[in-house]
Amino acid sequence: MAKNLGIYQFLKKNARLFWAFLFAAFSLILSRFLYFRDYPLFEFDYFGEILVSISFFFFAYYLGRTIVFSIGKWFESVIVNSIRKAVNEVWLSQMQKNSESSSKKEKQKDVVDAEDYIWTVKGTVLDTSAIIDGRILGILKAGFLDGVLIVPQNVINELQFMADKNDKIKRDKGRRGLDVLKEIRKVVGKKRFKIADVTTKPEEVDHSLVEFSKKYGTRIATVDFNLNKAAQVGGVEVLNINKLSNEIKLNVIPGETLLVKLVQNGKEEDQGVGYLEDGTMIVVRNGAKFIGEHKEVAIEKVLQTDAGRMIFAVLK
């Protein structure tokens, strides 16, 4: 046992010398068989082989250990980097899957079946015209409409279809509608914004909204005249934004005085036209001379027309 231990200590102490002799012997044999056996250096047998083996001896003795360690570190680095790269790719792939899964679940929270709706206040279905019109957004911001807002999937599809049109006017309307829809979702939050899984052909959208509202007891917000009539015939409550706009306009009576800025000529030569803050047109007799100025006027009469309300006044 002691003898074996002594041999081990000897080999450990003289490892560099041992490996140098091993390299020298290997190089002598290799050079002999590959070249110098047929072409002896300076015509002396084994002279070339000895020079090669001596060179390899000193090379292995002085630089072998450094080279071996360098190769080992390089190999270790390659292995570690390869493993790290593989682990990172697996990790990133898993993170992406988790993100997609989370996004899909989040989206599914918005897209639900109508049967799953639970309303403490009656829900309101938004049609394409109300979304494009945009005034519904101001109504929501002002807090005048509560309850769940429901946007059927076929309405979203219609907006996207319009946004992809070649016709600039329709394309702009579709894009505006999609932008308004995003803002509505931000204003009311996820709990109050729901997408109903209703898909139909474009020409059947209005009919599907009426049937949906009849089935689930919701109301419809619209500015579309035909949908308004169809919903009323079907017994569905309608929030007509145009009617709401007219109802909240400033109420004036004949004889009342107002300060109005005249901005353009009227149909008659002596008329000037101005607008109230709510957008109501006011036609002022003898106001053509004062375009661009603020004038005090007296109300003569108020007319309600299909195009809206018109006020006729005279300069004071």
Image (tube, helix red, strand yellow):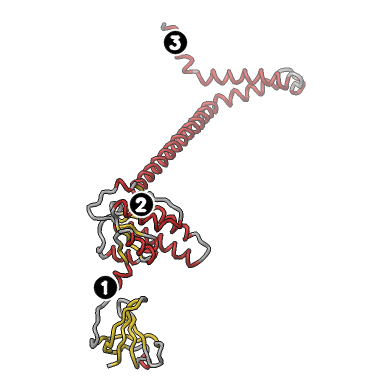
Q: In the displayed structure, does residue 149 sit left or right of residue 62? A: left
Q: What residue is shown with label 2? A: 195
Which tag, 2 or 3, sits closer to the chain's start?
Answer: 3
Which tag, 1 or 3, sits closer to the chain's start?
Answer: 3
- Across and down, in percent, residue 126 comes to 34, 59
Which residue appears at 36% of the width and 46% of the height? 108
Q: Cα distance, mark 2 to mark 3? A: 85 Å
Q: What residue is shown with label 1? A: 248
Which residue appears at 33% of the width and 52% of the height? 194
- Closer to the camera in the image, 262 or 12: 262
Q: Residues within 10 Å of mark 3 (few under 14, many from 20)?
A: few
* Quarter of image, res 298: bottom left
Q: What residue is shown with label 3? A: 6
Q: Are marks 2 and 1 in contact (CB under 8 Å)?
A: no
Which residue appears at 47% of the width and 34% of the height? 86
- Across and down, in percent, residue 32 comes to 70, 19
Q: Cα distance, mark 2 to mark 1? A: 30 Å
- Across and down, in percent, residue 24 comes to 61, 20
Q: In the displayed structure, does residue 306 sit left or right of residue 9? A: left
Q: Cα distance, mark 1 to mark 3? A: 108 Å
